[in-house]
Image (cartoon, rainbow, N blue to C red):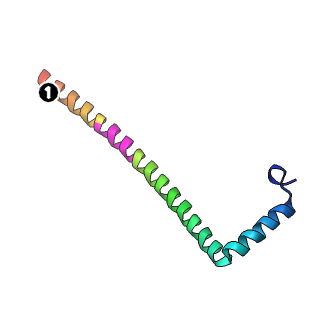
Amino acid sequence: MGLGGISIWQLLIILAIVVMIFGTKRLKNLGSDLGGAIKGFKNSMAEEEKNDETKELGENTASKVDANADSKSTSSSDK
């Protein structure tokens, strides 16, 4: 048994028909295009995660700077 009740021989026959219809060159181009698309998707996801982390760090730093500025202004007004 193969995928969902399809045997190995049936899969090989389907593969042979697809190769005869499209040809190996077109299938090779399709495979490389699909691989490039997946690689681009992974790169954009990694880039977006990096941007999100940078934003979070920036917000945390900005809130710390604001907190420091507030504490300095209150301590200077106490003098």
The residue sitting at 19% across, 30% down in the picture is 72
| The one of 75 and 3 positioned closer to us in this rendering | 3
> Where the C terminus falls, by quadrant?
top left
**Is residue 29 visible in this depiction of the protein?**
yes
Residue for badge 1: 76
- Residue 45 point in image, percent of width and height: 49, 52
* Residue 25 in the image: above or below residue 63: below
The residue sitting at 14% across, 27% down in the picture is 76
In the rendered structure, which amino acid carries the disc numbered 1? Ser
Q: Where does the magenta region start and end?
A: 54-62
Q: Main secondary structure of the magenta part?
A: helix
| The one of 15 and 71 positioned closer to us in this rendering | 15
Name the quadrant containing residue 64: top left
- Residue 29 point in image, percent of width and height: 59, 73
The residue sitting at 86% across, 63% down in the picture is 9
* Residue 45 in the image: above or below residue 59: below
Compared across the picture, whether 2 is left or right of 61 comes to: right
The residue sitting at 68% across, 76% down in the picture is 23
Q: Secondary structure at mark 1?
A: helix
- Residue 17 point in image, percent of width and height: 76, 70
**Is residue 79 visible in this depiction of the protein?**
no
Name the quadrant containing residue 65: top left
